[in-house]
Amino acid sequence: MGALKNFVAECDAFRNIRHRNLIKILIACSSVDFKGNDFKAMVFEFKPNGTLESWLHPEGNDPFISKTLKLMQRINIAIDVESALEYLHHHGQVPIIHCDLKPSNILLDDDMTALVSDFGLARFINESATSSTSSFGIKGTIGYIAPEYGMTNKVSMHGDVYSYGIFLMELFTGKRPTDGAFKEGRTLRTFVMGGFSEGVMSTMDECLLANGVQASDHSQTIDHAKTFECVSLVLRIIGLLCTNDLSMEQMDIRRVRNKLNKINKVFFER
């Protein structure tokens, strides 16, 4: 239901965008299949490392089950996705709202560069506006949708920023916003907020600590402390601000890049 509209929307979006962190379309096909039914498809570049989802939540037969993302890789992925969103919102020919940002729509190249994909729900907005009316009921995926979308039929840049904040929390906690532990008013956001009273270590993806330096107990302690501090900064000054219930108090996507670059410089640049 709605597949044709999504296909047309995606074609329209890809006609207008070119960026290193957006998936590149090779060709679009519109024909009929062997039964005479409409057949429409898009062919994209193959990305050997699959989706970010498969790295954060590997399943039993998943080829990435033995692999984990290191802290620096997660920071770089966060920067890549922010760069894609900033381009869509502010630097393309026409401002575009993605409307469905989540790990399963982020692909990883052979060098682990992140590329945003799936523009089936994308919406164009006027140059002078920050939102666009949509005829769709739900604009995105449960858990990643901005609260404001439940009260209005307008999609906005704020909605993408909210989804980015949820994605960021999932990237560093390893927990989906739809995790079974989140019920009775508890959410991924409240889980992260609680981490600052209990210690962010309790909310951080345990795989990050498994990648500590193994040379000696002392060096591993230092590495864990650095990891703890870095993740704390990302979640506190970016993740929580991007997911503020009041859209006008959310962090602007352009400020996210500055914050991430500063964190990257402090912890990883020599």
Image: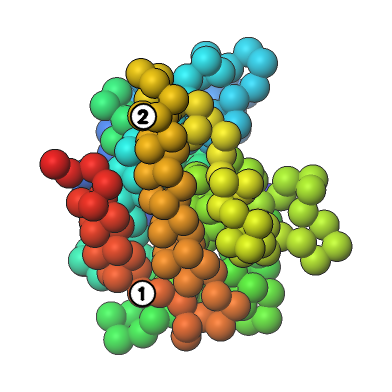
Image quadrant for the C terminus? top left
Q: Position of residue 20 (x, y in %)?
A: 22, 44
Residue sitting at the far left: 270
Label drawn at residue 219: 2
- Above-or-below relation of 4 to 95: above
On the image, which quarter does residue 139 sit in?
bottom right
**How many marks overall?**
2
Label drawn at residue 156: none
Amino acid of disc 1: Asp
Front-most of residues 172 and 143: 172
Say what secondary structure mark 2 lies in.
Answer: helix
Residue located at (42% from left, 43% from top): 225
Q: CA distance from mark 1 to mark 2?
A: 37 Å
On the image, which quarter does residue 96 sit in?
bottom left
Amino acid of disc 2: Ser
Residue denoted by label 1: 252
